[in-house]
Structures are given as C-alpha cells and as structure tokens.
Amino acid sequence: MSSFQRKGALQIAEAANRLIDPVLARKAGINTALIGSWDEIAGADFAECTRPEKITWPRANVDRYGDAGGVEPGVLTIACEGARALFLAHAQGELIQRINGFFGYPAIRQVRIVQKPVNMGHKHRPKPRPLTRDQQAKLTDMTADIDNEKLKAALERLGRGVMGRRVK
C-alpha cells in the first residue's frame, strides 16, 4: 500500500501539502499551515499587505540539530507593501506573540520586514451597475463626435465604469 493510498477519501489540499511542505521547509523554513493561516495570524490590519517569506534559523541550530533547526528561535522575514511597513514595525511584538502562539512554542524571536509588493491575487471588482437611460444618453452624446471607433469604444467603456460605479 503506497503512502497516498488509505481507507477513505484523500483531500487534494492534504496531498498537495505533503508534497509542498518539505520543499518549503528546505527552501524557506516555513510550511503551508503558516501560509494558510497568515490572515488570522496577521490580523485584519496586515493580512492584505503582508506575506511570510522565510524563517532563518540560527546557524548553531543547523550545526547542532540538522536542517530541522527549531530549538533556538529564528527570524521571520515578512514582505510588506509600502508605508504599511512602518505600522507593522510598531506592531511586531504582538505579531511575534501571535506567530509563536500559532507554532505552540517560541519559534520566532525577531521579525525582519522587507518592503516589496505583495501579490495576493487580484480581487474581483464588482461589475458596474447598469446605466440609467439618462446616463446612457449623456454618455452617447459625449462620445458622438469621436470618429475613431476604437477610441470611442474605449471611452464608452470608461464612461460606463465611472458612471456605473457602486458607492460603498
């Protein structure tokens, strides 16, 4: 019986994590559980603008205990977007407590913040609401004198987006 066969169904995420975790641990010192739980660990203020990148274990750990490290706390490198890094720096004590609470032991002693874009995927913008007849007539009137069809179509799309924007 192979390691992937067992009684009952195997979730795809579980199989993927088995494959990805050893690579992440070797290359970055982190696991998919930390990445998957990052939104809860970082909290609402930092979930969208930060991402854990790697954990650097002290060299003494690697020499004494092998690649697993883990006895002495490491340094977590976090990517953070722009000016939010300053706020993250002020909140890093609380963040370290949350991370260590996640691990269940003092795994992290310090956070290193690197400013860079954090691409968590593009959020789907809501479609603009349909224009009223008056808005559509106004838009058609505004673009009526444009001869270039591509430019006219692009400006009409822009106008529909601006006029149909949903108010939060």
Image: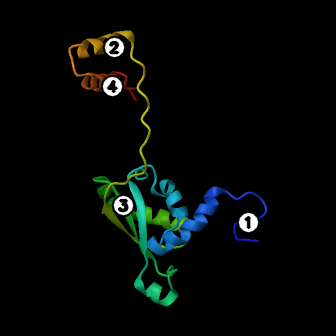
Label whose residue precedes the other's in the sequence (2 or 1): 1
Q: State how far apart marks 2 and 3 are (Cα).
A: 44 Å
Q: Which is in the foreground here, disc 3 or disc 4?
A: 4
Applied colour scheme = rainbow
What residue is disc 3 on? 79
Instruction: Give x and y (percent) for residue 102.
Output: 54, 64
Q: Amino acid at mark 1?
A: Gln
Q: Looking at the image, do the residues carrying marks 1 and 3 touch, with CB atoms under 8 Å apart?
A: no
If you read the primary sequence from the N terminus, does the residue marked by circle 2 or circle 4 appear first?
2
Left or right of 155 on screen, residue 68: right
Left or right? Give the position of 9 relative to 42.
Answer: right
Give the percent coordinates (x, y) of residue 155: 27, 24
Q: Dot 2 lies on which element?
A: helix
- The numbered mark, 1 or 3, whose residue comes first in the sequence reads 1
Residue named by callout 1: 5
What x and y, as percent, mark residue 162?
A: 32, 25
The image quadrant where one finds the C terminus is: top left
- Mark 2 and mark 3 lie on one chain; the one further toward the N terminus is 3
Q: Which residue is mark 4?
A: 157
Residue that extends furthest to the right in the rendered view of this protein: 7
119 or 151: nearer the viewer: 151
What's the residue type where badge 4 is placed? Arg
Which secondary structure lies at badge 1?
loop
> Which of the 4 image quadrants contains residue 147?
top left
Q: Position of residue 21 (x, y in %)?
A: 55, 68
Q: Amino acid at mark 3?
A: Ala
The span from disc 3 to disc 4 (Cα, nearest Å) is: 35 Å
Other-residue count near label 3 (Cα within 10 Å), few / some / many at <14 / 14–19 / ≥20: many
CA distance for labels 1 and 3:
38 Å
Out of 40 and 80, give the one closest to the viewer. 80
